Amino acid sequence: AAEIRASAQQQAASVEEQFAAVQETAATVDEITHSGAQIGKRATEVIATAQATAQTSRQGLRAVSDTAKAMDAIREQAEAVAGNIVSLSEKTQTIGDIIETVNDISERTHLLALNAAIEAAAAGESGRSFAVVASEMKLLADQAKAATGQVRGILGEIQRGINTSVMLTEEAVK
């Protein structure tokens, strides 16, 4: 009977050890399950964050692309404006050349009027009407010279404005 009792006690101790081991295993499984759930939750959060970041990146890329296209369009427009400004500059140079020609004609007309006045004075009374014509020629030459001076001044202002526009356009294109 002592043997049976010892054997029963041994089996009871063994069952208690197994029960403790099963409880420990169950607790470990619960911890692993809980940890797995937390890992799953964290993984879901990471995936959501990554997707949001990817979406934001795509939007940023689209914005950069749109900005680059807009900048290209602005550059093309600025280059077209620069081309027009250069054309205007060339035309103002041509106008300047015409003004020089008109000014030269004015000076020559003034000399011609002076010579006509001298000839009219030398002709005496018979050159008197010619002196009036010479005086009018001189007056017209003086008016033409004054007008070309005004036009030259305005043309200079236009040319300075064109030069400023060219510089600003070149700066904008850069």
Image (cartoon, grey):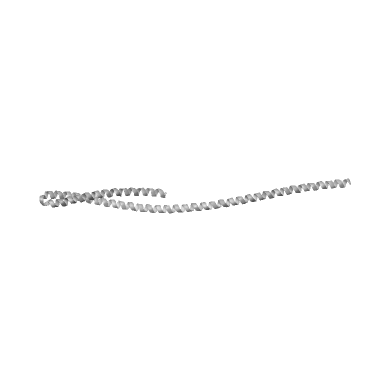
- Residue 86 vs residue 127, the one in the foreground: 127
92 relative to 138 in the view: left or right: right
What residue lies at 72% left-to-right and 48% top-to-bottom?
27
16 relative to 117 in the view: left or right: right
| Image x and y of residue 22, in percent | 76, 49
| Image x and y of residue 77, in percent | 40, 53
What residue lies at 29% left-to-right and 48% top-to-bottom?
153
What residue lies at 24% left-to-right and 52% top-to-bottom?
102
| Image x and y of residue 39, in percent | 65, 49
What residue lies at 43% left-to-right and 54% top-to-bottom?
73
Marker count (numbered): 0
- Residue 74 vs residue 142, the one in the foreground: 142
153 relative to 28 in the view: left or right: left
Point out the residue furthest to the right here. 1
| Image x and y of residue 146, in percent | 24, 48
